[in-house]
Amino acid sequence: MLSFFLIGAAIGALTGVPIGPVNVAVIDAAYRHTLRRGIAVGLGGAIGDFVFSGAAMLWVGPHVIGQPGVKPVLFAISGLVLIVYGILTVRSQPPAAPATAPHSIPPSHEVWNGLTVGLGLIALNPAAIVTWVVVVGSHLNDLSTLEALAAALGVFVGSLAWFSFVAFIADQGKRIMGDRAVWVMRIVGLGLIGYGVYSLGRAIRYFAS
């Protein structure tokens, strides 16, 4: 059981490295709000990864993703979500002044808002299940229910550790860069738009073939 947990933790951390909507949301929350909110967004994303990875191991599997028409629909929805979120990120405003930002929202509301953003980004990005099926199929297959749950819990821990690290780095960057930090978000937002267009292109190629 421990070995499956450790494998899941490594996979959870490594799959969080590529820039995606949750990473961007964590950076945005830490830049424009507080470190606490950034970690809360990461917690929501980690919960989503736990659910999706568990579903990939226990229920969904490649046979569902392999059904005709499923992949292009997932990639199309994902592409639209990434494009919209990328546009919102590009249009984001400079960080609030450090003296007022931590007191603008009560801590409990801030954590809840961040958590719902992280969960929402995973739920609205169904193509993530495709990634988890591929990853799980390559490293974790033919597991018992308990082994799959241990691996999914490891994914949660690894994802949360990575997103918390990203939030910390973003928070430190805000302190150093000040208002110039907004350009980091705009560049990353443009990257998200580009990846969203790429996902839509994949969906169109599936439908056209």
Image: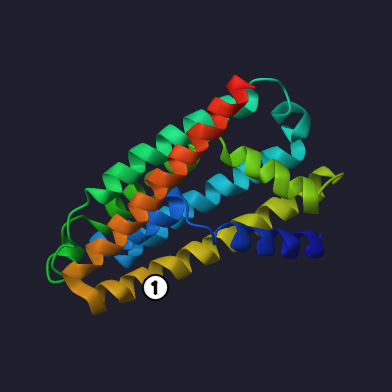
Residue, disc 1: 169
Whole-percent x, y for residue 38 in the image? 36, 60
Quarter of the picture containing the C terminus is top right
Residue drawn 41% across the image and 41% down it:
82
Q: 199 or 8, which lies in front?
A: 199
Identify the image quadrant of the N terminus.
bottom right
Quarter holding residue 24: bottom left
Spot occupied by residue 207 in the image (x, y as percentages of width and height) = 59, 21
Q: Residue 58 appears in which quarter of the rendering?
A: top right
Q: To which quarter of the image does residue 156 belong?
A: bottom right
Q: Residue at x 20, y 69 (%)?
A: 180
Query: Is 28 on the left or on the right of 97, as rendered?
Result: right
Along the line of sight, which residue is nearer the eye, 81 or 50?
Answer: 81
Residue 152 lies, with reference to residue 69, above or below; the image says: below
Q: Is residue 175 visible?
A: yes
Left or right, 162 with reference to 154: left
What kind of colouring is applied to the model shown?
A: rainbow
Q: Residue furthest bottom?
A: 176
